[in-house]
């Protein structure tokens, strides 16, 4: 087993790209808020695909390094989980439509229910719709959202805006996150 750590330039590039993806994820959350009704469809899709593309760049950057250092092609393919790749250019697939049907409480056709993936995604959508009916959210999800919102607000020096678009509990958590952060000062030469 190779115990060589990730080279520092690669590590820094990965950290930068993951930070960019996290910022895009925060914007996806931001555009789901009620005050964004006029633009949520366009902006959630833009930012979600930005995040996906950026994380794909992370994977390809690491894969290129692994390839460069002699990793076997079948091992690299396995690590990249190539069988899970979906192309956005094909648009939403049957399993995506099944998921939405479950979320929206709509029936799924007999034909669609025969496909295992469609059935699984439909039931996932139903579970998510049921969970949305309960005001208590998963603490881990709440914390993740608060961290993303608080981080973005702190970096943009706009902590006060949290109260204008988040529910009070989430705004309070995001404010605590922002208050706990120190924005690093750039070193001067």
Image: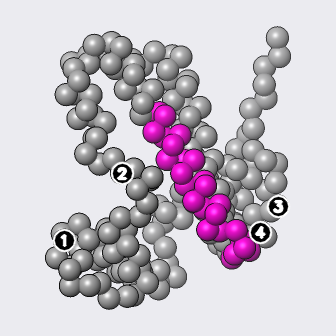
Local crowd at mark 1 within 10 Å, few (<14), some, or many (≥20)? Answer: few
Cα separation between marks 3 and 4: 6 Å
Mark before the other along the chain sequence, 1 or 3: 1
Q: Cβ–Cβ below 8 Å for labels 3 and 4?
A: yes
Does the segment drawn in magenta span residue 138? no
Measured as percent of width and height from the top left, residue 71 is found at 26, 18
Instruction: Name the secondary structure under disc 3.
Output: helix
Q: Cβ–Cβ below 8 Å for labels 4 and 1?
A: no
Q: Is residue 59 above or below residue 178?
A: above
The magenta span reads 34-58
Instruction: Name the secondary structure under disc 2.
Output: loop
Mark before the other along the chain sequence, 4 or 1: 1
Magenta stretch: helix, strand or loop mostly: helix
Measured as percent of width and height from the top left, residue 164 is found at 79, 70
Q: Which residue is labeled 1 in the image?
A: 115
Is label 2 or label 3 in front? Answer: 2
Cα separation between marks 1 and 3: 48 Å
Residue at left 41%, top 64%? 92
Task: Please state if 113 lies on the left or on the right of 133 as rendered.
Answer: left
Cα separation between marks 2 and 3: 39 Å
Location of residue 146 by image quarter: bottom right
Q: Which residue is labeled 3 in the image?
A: 160
């Amino acid at each position: 087993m190779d115990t060589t750590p990730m080279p520092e330039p690669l590590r820094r590039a990965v950290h930068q790209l993951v930070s960019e993806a996290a910022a895009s994820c925060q914007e996806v959350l931001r555009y789901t808020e009620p005050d964004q009704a006029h633009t949520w469809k366009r902006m959630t899709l833009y930012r979600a695909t930005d995040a996906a593309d950026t994380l794909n760049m992370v994977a390809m950057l690491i894969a290129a390094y692994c390839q460069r250092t002699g990793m076997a092609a079948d091992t690299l393919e396995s690590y990249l989980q190539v069988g899970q790749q979906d192309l956005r250019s094909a648009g939403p697939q049957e399993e995506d439509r099944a998921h939405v049907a479950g979320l929206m409480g709509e029936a799924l056709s007999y034909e669609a229910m025969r496909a295992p993936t469609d059935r699984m995604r439909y039931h996932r959508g139903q579970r998510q719709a049921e969970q949305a009916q309960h005001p208590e959210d998963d603490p881990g999800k709440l914390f993740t959202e608060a961290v993303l919102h608080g981080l973005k607000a702190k970096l943009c020096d706009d902590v006060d805006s949290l109260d204008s678009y988040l529910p009070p509990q989430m705004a309070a958590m995001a404010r605590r996150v922002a208050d706990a952060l120190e924005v690093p000062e750039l070193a001067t030469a």
